[in-house]
Image (cartoon, coloured by chain):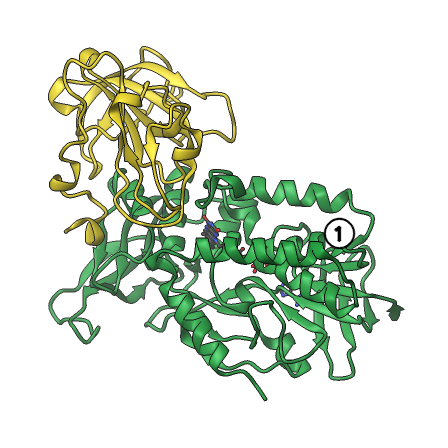
Amino acid sequence: MKLFETGIPDRELLEGLAPPPDRAKPLAVLECFEEFPCDPCKAVCPTDAIVMNRITDIPRLIPERCTGCAKCVVACPGLAIFMVWPKKNLVWVPHEFVPIPERGEIVDALDREGNVIAQAEVKAVMNARKKLETTVVCVQVPKELLMEVRAIRVREKKDARD
Amino acid sequence: MSEKLDVQLAVVGGGPAGLAAALAASRFGLEVLLIDENKELGGQLIKQTHKFFGSHNHMASVRGIEIANRLKKEIRENSHITVFLDTTAVGYYENGELLLYRKSPEEKLVSCFPKAVIFATGARENMLAFPGNDLPGVYGAGAVQTLMNVYGVLPARKILMVGSGNIGLIVSYQLLQAGTEVAAIVEILPWIGGYIVHASKVRRYGVPILTRHTIIEARGKEWVEEAVIAKVGEDFNPIEGTEKVLEVDAVCLAVGLSPIVELVRQAGVYTPYIPELGGLVPWHDDDMRTNLPNVFVAGDLAGIEEATTAMLEGELAALSAAEYFGVKSEEIQKMRKDRKARLEELRASRFSDKVKNGLQKLAAKRPK
Ligand SMILES: Cc1cc2nc3c(=O)[nH]c(=O)nc-3n(C[C@H](O)[C@H](O)[C@H](O)COP(=O)(O)OP(=O)(O)OC[C@H]3O[C@@H](n4cnc5c(N)ncnc54)[C@H](O)[C@@H]3O)c2cc1C
């Protein structure tokens, strides 16, 4: 397993995490692969869709229960939870950088290694103004990149002074 | 000019361990003097802008700085706790004298003979030996964090991080947030030291994490201009021919912490060497009692761990101190049981194996 040497999740770990293409709602994608004491995702889930028996367990998602509310995406201290909705080609990623993009803006979409793999339109921004909360940005990306895009970078704005 | 002061319980160090200790002690009617050398309470917490891990019921997902704010508010509102900021405890003598050097509001030495002391002085960073490590621009991770997160000063434009434990990973992430480019994170071990989610988080923004790599030199005329890294072999020695030169203007060292034991040693607390806990550590039992009946320890001083565990240890130390003063209450036993259960829960993953081994070794060294 390369994950523990590089920080990049191995393909086999990601198998089975993608939502079915016809799912009616977005689905949380938990990219948390290591046992350590942490449970906010489970605690904030309003439908008990995240299962952990002990605080050190790896969280497991029950897709039928997930409503796509994104509460876990916001709560995860490891920024390891995303949300994907194949029907609308949308990905939600946590974003703790300034500037925070605006709806309609085109941003760089990054994969798990930081490569820019697409230009994506921002469709929604959650928690943009809450200082202590993690902002979550929803972007539209090509279907084949739904399980690849895991971060965004706001492009440098051309400063009027340049 | 020196002044004398009457103190029941002194708590030295105002990080999470000291804050929790002071609050818990006051619950049992003890009069507390809380001392910290900084101008603000909170210890390491005031630099932690990331969300904490741990149990949702106990402030996980809350940012460190916010945890500090909550505890500070409780302390301010507590009439049993007197706070001395900008005050360093400079000596603790066998006759029980604790000497304080106050820098403000007026510079002076204050002498007191507290009937009991809880030490929660935290830890200091380890240095690494390599040519050029004395150049300006070679920082400890704590300094980098203080500059960025406390004073709002950007420590570098492009930096090399040495060490992939949680501190190296988190500070790398905070550097990216501040606008510094992180050239790479080097790690001498074959695997990443910290939580993998932290590693994935920085990797996602393009930062390479190079395991089996170390820094061998920092170069520059007046400050760091480049860093040389190399691959290491099974013996951890650099392999010739694998050197790479990175153009950076700073190097950040995140290679471990050691407990600050000078004061407790001065008083005669036994401090065996337990590498798993960070080096020399004050001997203590699981109620945070040392070999001296009126001296207790908590937090990173008692073994390098986490803020979550530091707070629980602080409370356990306070319970022992309350008992020392003859407080008898069922509440003590109840709290003790609860805090110990929580510690055990937090220490259940493989990340705590080292600490648990260390604590076992420490227990075996119980002084006669
Ligand atoms: C980058 C980073 C990220 C971290 N992230 C997490 C996390 O996500 N979750 C978590 O649980 N933990 C985290 N930690 C660990 C946590 O910050 C420490 O374990 C914790 O702060 C230890 O608490 P403490 O009270 O023992 O010591 P400290 O917080 O170090 O406080 C000790 C205080 O004592 C003062 N002091 C020392 N000597 C004297 C003296 N002689 N006189 C007066 N004052 C003195 C110091 O100035 C300091 O203010 C992180 C640490 C770092 C560096």
Pointer 1 indicates a residue of which chain?
Answer: B
Q: Position of residue A109 (x, y in %)?
A: 23, 26
Residue B176 drawn at (x, y percent): 36, 41
* Chain A shade: yellow
What x and y, as percent, mark residue B179? 39, 38
Q: Quadrant of residue A45?
A: top left
Q: Colour of chain B?
A: green
Query: On screen, B10 above or below A54?
Result: below
The residue wearing badge 1 is B27
Classify the position of the N terminus of chain B by image quarter. Answer: bottom right
Q: Is residue B364 above or below residue A117?
A: below
**Observer-nearest of A77 and A23:** A23
Disc 1 crowd rating (10 Å Cα; few below 14, some 14-19, many 20+) is some
- Percent across and percent down for residue B214 are 25, 65
What residue appears at the point 48 percent right and 56 percent down from the top-left corner? B306
Residue A47 lies, with reference to residue B219, above or below; the image says above
Q: Is residue B270 visible?
A: yes
